[in-house]
Image (cartoon, helix red, strand yellow):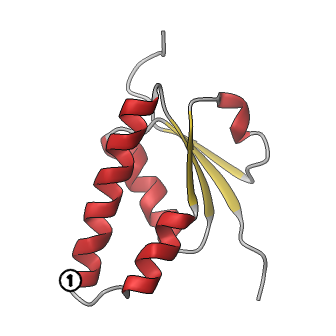
Amino acid sequence: MAPARTMAVIGNGIIGHGIAEVFAGAGWKVRLIGRDAKSLAGARARIGASLKLFVANRLMTETGRKAALGRIKTTTRLEDAAPAELVIEAVLRTWR
């Protein structure tokens, strides 16, 4: 088995958290970079709720859900994107 690839998503809103969810579900290690801890907690909660729907509809196992969530690391540090093979920017406007 090939080692997990690493990607970063800069922005954790409507689009960013969804991108992170898809890549984590596909086996990638994800660095989800957001503005603050509160917004990142909200993004993580939305991802968790979405993955629960996949389990409820038998599109993913509970083990797969937990594994996908485990592959997502949240941070507010842009520097944490440095080791990523792929970086996707999903920011609505310039950060202040």
- Which residue is labeled 1 in the image? 56
In front: 66, or 84? 66
Image quadrant of residue 76? Answer: top right
Q: Secondary structure at mark 1?
A: helix
Q: Is residue 10 above or below residue 57?
A: above
Determine the residue positioned at 30% across, 43% down: 14
Residue 36 picture location, percent across and down? 46, 26
Image quadrant of residue 71? Answer: bottom right
Residue 37 picture location, percent across and down? 45, 31
Residue 48 picture location, percent across and down? 33, 62
Determine the residue positioned at 41% across, 76% down: 65
Q: Is residue 74 above or below residue 11?
A: below
Q: Is residue 73 above or below residue 1?
A: above
Lateral position of residue 68 relative to residue 71, left or right:
left
**Quadrant of the image containing the N terminus:** bottom right
Lateral position of residue 85 relative to residue 44, left or right:
right
In front: 58, or 42? 42
Determine the residue positioned at 25% across, 62% down: 49
